[in-house]
């Protein structure tokens, strides 16, 4: 296999934004319980996608269905 050298300059005149910039995603920091994170990581591994993508898909589905949380104390 031939090893390629980096050019001194690159022309990005005709460059287009990457596919992720078109998805309207925003990077955030979120704190999740360790059990919750472990659950999503295991599930993501089973289906073969990154766990962040899986969490995003799940939350997107909740938002589309206008799902609400049933919260009971104790």
Image: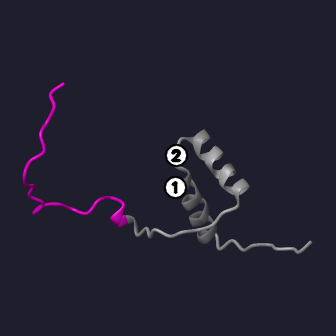
Asked if residue 72 is positioned above or below residue 11 in the image, the reply reads below
Magenta-tinted stretch: 1-22
Q: In terms of secondary structure, what is the magenta stretch mainly?
A: loop
Which picture quadrant has residue 55?
Answer: bottom right
- Which residue sits furthest right? 74
- Depth check, front residue: 1 or 73: 1
Residue 39, image x and y in percent?
69, 50
Q: How crowded is mark 1: few (under 14 residues within 10 Å), some or many (20 or more)?
A: few
Depth check: 15 or 33 in front?
A: 33
Residue on which the image places disc 1: 53
Residue 26 at x, y percent in the picture = 44, 70
Image disc number at residue 66: none
What is the quadrant of the C terminus in the image?
bottom right
- The residue furthest top is 1
The residue that appears at 59% across and 46% down in the rendered structure is 44
Give the x, y percent position of residue 22: 34, 66
Q: In this view, does 4 lie above or below 60?
A: above
Provide residue 68's location: percent of width, then percent of height: 72, 74
Q: Does the magenta stretch include residue 72?
A: no
**Residue 6, located in which quarter of the rendered image?**
top left
**Disc 2 + disc 1, Cβ < 8 Å:** yes
Badge 1 marks a residue whose secondary structure is helix
**Residue at mark 2:** 49
Q: Residue at x 19, y 24 (%)?
A: 1
């Amino acid at each position: 296999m031939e090893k390629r050298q980096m050019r001194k300059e690159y022309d990005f005149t005709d460059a287009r934004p990457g596919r992720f910039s078109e998805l309207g995603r925003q990077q955030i920091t979120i704190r999740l319980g360790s059990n919750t994170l472990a659950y999503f990581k295991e599930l993501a591994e089973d289906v073969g996608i990154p766990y962040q993508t899986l969490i995003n898909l799940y939350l997107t589905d909740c938002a589309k269905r206008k799902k609400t949380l049933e919260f009971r104390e104790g």
